[in-house]
């Protein structure tokens, strides 16, 4: 372990620093931790709606602002919050210093609005930590080799925090948010849902792609790659949250960790697709070129030389997808392209599934008993997802949560 | 002349970019000039009240924010306006790129909130100008050698513009503001006041210190030092404004350029000061140490071994000055310290004064005819100032303006 082994990286999201009152609360929490003897690096997002307000300003000028200039503009949001947090910590009698992404050498590529971190030069941070200061870093932003300001895209502050935790060898990266951790199901749907004390990166990734809103998959992927433990917890309470870490033995005993629901997808069906080799590749290559993220794909068994091909995409990409799919359909001699937005994807996730059979049938039985029809099914090593009618979503989640006994310990 | 001899530096103040509508107007003006074949560097202040709003945020946290963190905070104001202006120029079909002070290498000392520019590395600006882009630079800010963000203090954007004009060898530095130029008197007081087409740096400095609000003295001093011509003009019209440049022959024929009034000073009088060598030095050394800017000093003739000492300071420093002056008074065995805020300083300024006599008596006569009593008098080579009762200020300015025939050509 390095000299910085007692280092903690904390990250506070927009709701945690929504206003001056919340910033003062964050300052108290940081100072409390520092006084326990930890070295502290704190990553902060922009205050509440600041980023959206700045984007609105840009759109009053032009529908298609330059991405470089957008990064110039929206990166100010985090610069404001870090300086205010530094002042709030000073006010409590502790030393603190704030930095932009550029100042602490968060070097990225040149993909403005969705840049990737290439390198972090930790020299300045380490100097300031040695002086006993809390180091506050603007999340979500970096700088290119040619000194142009970049931003890291959605969930970018989480990426900043994980990358700093890795670069500095922090023992944990604490992600403060407005929920208390990762639950076996959304507590608004299932009142008996239980907070998970520990979960693997893989499960968290499946949770996120299955619709849980706690963490962006990108930051979990980076944490997994570098084996940085994440502690997801609430900035509104002092309770412990959920630790996301690499798989440990105890996790395998838990077959299913949780059940999630995602209502933000639409199902697209291309009818009467000629059942020939290479057709699926043609369809999905063209869709991928349009930067549309496809989730599930189902191809029915062909009996006539023609088949129906269904897939799900984020609802916000529905119109773009329909346009592209219809164009492809004409070219390959397929039929109508239809869509359905009234769908919900219900998933169960758990590392223990790998070594246990019968999970799928147990899930299907729970749905059958509630007379819920399954439209599509897809499985991964640690996840099973069913697409059902949107109106049955809550009923399905409750039934499955109960079936697997997730509420009890 | 260098390759950049057709370069113009423009600076737009806060009122010129008060909102999105004004930013679009500025963009039009810039593009119009660019299409005439000029290379354009544009320095921009923060939008309208942004800086004040940011300062208010800081003061909700602490009464005495760290100056380094204040610079972090308020420098975001200009970063927002430059990126928005770049977008507005793009929208008009021209190329533009925005930069922070740090990005264009405006290197300053470490005096946060009032830093001095040490050097400008113009390489990036010249690269972008060569590509045919309008270069937009955040005013008011720079960066230290250790990459800490600084601001340049009041009127800092003007300093940025003048320093860039010098560094790039621009033919003129255009300062856009909400008035049409420098007038023979404040047109709100003297309806017949006339806009000056040309004025020397020295006169402008005296105008500024005498209370004219058009330009901060610091930027005029820097322009004078580097011989950069300034064109003060309005961003709300296309009229020519006032050129501020080094003295030219024609200026000497104009004895008095204008009359100004300053109501923002207070008169402090220290009574019964022992009339001994070194006493004045002791008093004013102590006041200078408190960072109080003294303007006029008057010592009455001593007949009794004791004298009264009067001086003027900015009204905002009144309480601090009184505290310091009373402390000094006790130490040197002087008497009461009194003050008067109901004063106005009326001044006439003109380079021609050097070679013409009788200006003072002409000014005093004008005041006498209006039965206005003079409280203090002070003169410089090109300025005569009289302190009078505040209630007579407008009457005095009008009388003097008429006396010197400033309204006619």
Image (cartoon, coloured by chain):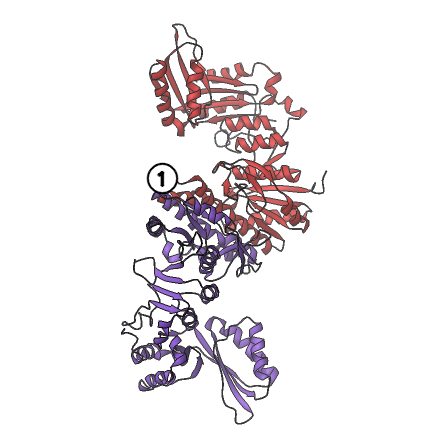
Chain colours: A purple, B red
Question: Which chain is home to disc 1?
Answer: B
Placement of A185 over or under B165, stated as above or below: below
Query: Would residue B388 be seen by someone viewing this image from the given angle?
Result: no
Placement of B273 over or under A187, stated as above or below: above
Placement of A266 over or under B166, stated as above or below: below
Residue A39 placement (x, y as % from top left)? 40, 50
Residue A329 placement (x, y as % from top left)? 57, 82
| Camera-nearest residue between B394 and B28 | B28
Which residue is farthest bottom? Answer: A304
Residue A48: name its quadrant: bottom left
| Camera-nearest residue between B349 and B378 | B378
| Camera-nearest residue between B101 and B13 | B101
Residue B384 placement (x, y as % from top left)? 52, 19
- Left or right side of B50 for A325: right
Which residue has dot 1 on it?
Answer: B63
* CA neighbours of label 1 inside 10 A, class few (<14), some (14 to 19), many (20+): few
Placement of B201 over or under A167, stated as above or below: above
């Amino acid at each position: 372990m390095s000299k910085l082994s007692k280092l903690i990286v904390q990250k506070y999201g927009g709701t945690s620093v929504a206003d001056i009152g919340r910033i003062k609360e964050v300052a108290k929490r940081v100072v409390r931790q520092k006084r326990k003897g930890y070295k502290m690096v704190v990553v902060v997002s922009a205050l509440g709606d600041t980023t959206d307000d700045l984007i609105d300003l840009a759109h009053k000028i032009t529908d298609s602002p330059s991405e470089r200039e957008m990064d110039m503009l929206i990166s100010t949001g985090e610069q404001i919050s870090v300086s205010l947090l530094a002042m709030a910590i000073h006010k409590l009698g502790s030393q603190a210093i704030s930095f932009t992404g550029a100042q602490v050498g968060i070097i990225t590529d040149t993909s403005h609005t969705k840049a990737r971190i290439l390198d972090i030069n930790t020299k300045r941070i380490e100097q300031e930590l040695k002086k006993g200061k809390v180091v506050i870093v603007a999340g979500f932003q970096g700088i290119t080799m040619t000194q142009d300001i970049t931003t890291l895209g959605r969930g970018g502050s989480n990426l900043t925090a994980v990358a700093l935790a890795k670069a500095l060898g922090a023992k944990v990266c604490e992600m403060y948010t407005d929920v208390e951790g990762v639950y076996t199901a959304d507590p608004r749907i299932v009142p008996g849902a239980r907070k998970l004390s520990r979960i693997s990166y893989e499960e968290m990734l499946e949770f996120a792609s299955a619709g849980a809103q706690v963490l962006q998959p990108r930051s979990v992927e980076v944490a997994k790659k570098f084996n940085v433990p994440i502690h997801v917890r609430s900035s509104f309470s002092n309770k412990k949250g959920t630790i996301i870490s690499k798989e440990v033995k105890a996790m395998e005993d838990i077959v299913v960790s949780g059940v999630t629901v995602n209502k933000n997808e639409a199902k697209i069906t291309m009818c009467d697709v000629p059942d020939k080799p290479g057709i699926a590749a043609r369809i999905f290559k063209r869709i991928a070129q349009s930067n549309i993220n496809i989730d599930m794909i189902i191809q029915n068994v062909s009996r006539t030389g023609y088949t129906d091909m269904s897939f799900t995409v984020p609802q916000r990409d529905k119109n773009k997808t329909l346009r592209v799919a219809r164009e492809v359909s004409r070219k390959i001699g397929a039929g109508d392209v239809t869509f359905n937005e009234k769908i919900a994807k219900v998933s169960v996730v758990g590392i223990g599934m790998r070594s246990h059979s019968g999970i799928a049938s147990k899930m299907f039985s729970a749905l059958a008993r509630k007379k819920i029809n399954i439209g599509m099914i897809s499985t991964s090593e640690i996840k099973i997802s069913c697409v059902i009618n949107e109106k049955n979503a809550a009923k399905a989640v409750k039934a499955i949560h109960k079936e697997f006994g997730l509420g009890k310990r």
